[in-house]
Image: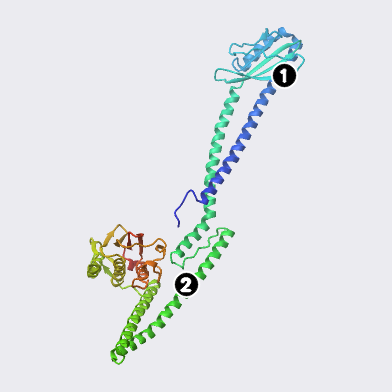
Amino acid sequence: MPPFNSRRSFALKLALFYALFFGVISAGGVALLYNLVRTHTLSEIDQELLERKEEIGLAAARIGLSGLRSEFSADSEAYGRQDYFIRLLDRSGKVLVSSDTSAWPLAPLPDIDASDDSPQFSYLHLPDARSKARILSAIIGDDAILQLGISLEENENFLRLFRRYALIIVFSMLTLGTLIGWALARKAMAGVEAVTRTAAGIAGGNFAHRVEAAGYGREIDDLVSTFNRMASRVQNLMEQMRQVNDNIAHDLRSPLTRIRGLAEGAAMNGNLGHDGIELAGSIVEECDRLIQMINTMLDISETEVGMQGLRLEAVEPARLARDVFDLFQDVALDKGIHLSADIPSVAAIQGDRRKLQRALANLLDNALKYTPSGGEVKVSLTEDANRIAWAVQDTGQGIAPVDLPHIFERFYRGDRSRHLAGSGLGLSLVRAIARAHGGDVSVESRFGQGSIFTMALPKQAWGQAH
């Protein structure tokens, strides 16, 4: 599975979209509800003030202005002196009748058009916890001005509490939207990720991988079904191609062996003359090279499909590395290459000694082949909690970036290596042997500076696990 990339993850973008959608809808809904509640409560207060104004107007007509003093005092006591006041003024602003206004820092009387009987509403900002009050100013009687004021402290406390809970609701909806969005996005993308993982496995050479249809939804299920059919067809084609190659190799080995025998017999006969004997010798050499290529190709195929069973035994990785190191010391000396080793003792593993030795020998042979005289090649052995790894490092010409992805393919040879002896099968065989043991081989290379090939195997008793 490819590593998770938060910047490019479609699932994350979809989850953020859901979260933003939920957040915007929730914030918009709460803002609208808050405005409606605020308008409604203020409207109720205004209506209450208007009703009280009408009552006072009727009382003034019935008992006169002088009789309103006791009624104003009663109202002030009923509502609370800090929460309510009422007063009657003349046009000059002189107070005619008033409740106790000692708790009210009253503003100057607003100008009122005597020809306009409609009441006027305003706000009075207060310096204490009451914050502000709602003021009604209206003309009653013979140009008398009535002012009613009521504290909005209770209303403001209610709206403040409403805002607090509204923020909690918006935050909860945003969190819920994010979680639901992430869950929905992951569910929607699960099928795509399954296809991606399977495609990665097929790209790595395991053509038997398939995506399990798990009810991802009609569109994704159709994609999974189509992908599985395509993978099956690719697997069949690859198996047919491999079988054809193996059949050709089998069919070629016998006639090549006969040609070699005929050429060798003719050369030993002595009746061909000098040129004929040289020609027969060349034919024998070419037949040997072709037979070796065919045998290697068949070994790779049989190892990959498990036809060649591994002869498992306890293998000491350090001893195997030292044996291969000793085997190539003379070759390195003849080429003028400094061959060194860092081979500590490590725990034994289960493996096929002959095949592992052949794989490591191929890596070392390649390193010596592509390292010029005066260069260095080093064989090392390392281990960690789960695996052991042989590494062969050289100071040779390195591998061109364009060649690096293909070097483990059969018969692949870079342009710089075509003039050297070889078949292009050695690294393919190394990979087949490593994978047959549950491991793999990797390479790090800088063009013109050398390469490091690493063959790593698991430390557990692989033969028992498989």
The answer to whether any part of residue 414 appears in the image is no
Q: Position of residue 93 (x, y in %)?
A: 68, 9
Amino acid on which disc 1 is placed = Pro
Amino acid on which disc 2 is placed = Met
Which residue matches tag 1? Answer: 119
Residue drawn 33% across the image and 68% down it:
463
- 88 shown above or below 171: above
* Along the line of sight, the residue nearer the viewer: 380 or 197: 380
Mark 2 and mark 1 in contact (Cβ < 8 Å)?
no
**Tag of residue 238:** 2
Compared across the picture, whether 79 is left or right of 392 comes to right
Query: Which corner quadrant of the image does residue 313 belong to?
Result: bottom left
What secondary structure is marked by label 2?
Answer: helix
Which quarter of the figure is the N terminus placed in? bottom left
**Tag of residue 285:** none
Q: Position of residue 88 (x, y in %)?
A: 69, 11
Q: Position of residue 384 (x, y in %)?
A: 30, 57
Marks 1, 2: nearer the viewer: 2
- 361 shown above or below 73: below
Which quarter of the figure is the C terminus placed in? bottom left
Q: Alpha carbon of mark 1 to alpha carbon of mark 2: how far?
A: 92 Å
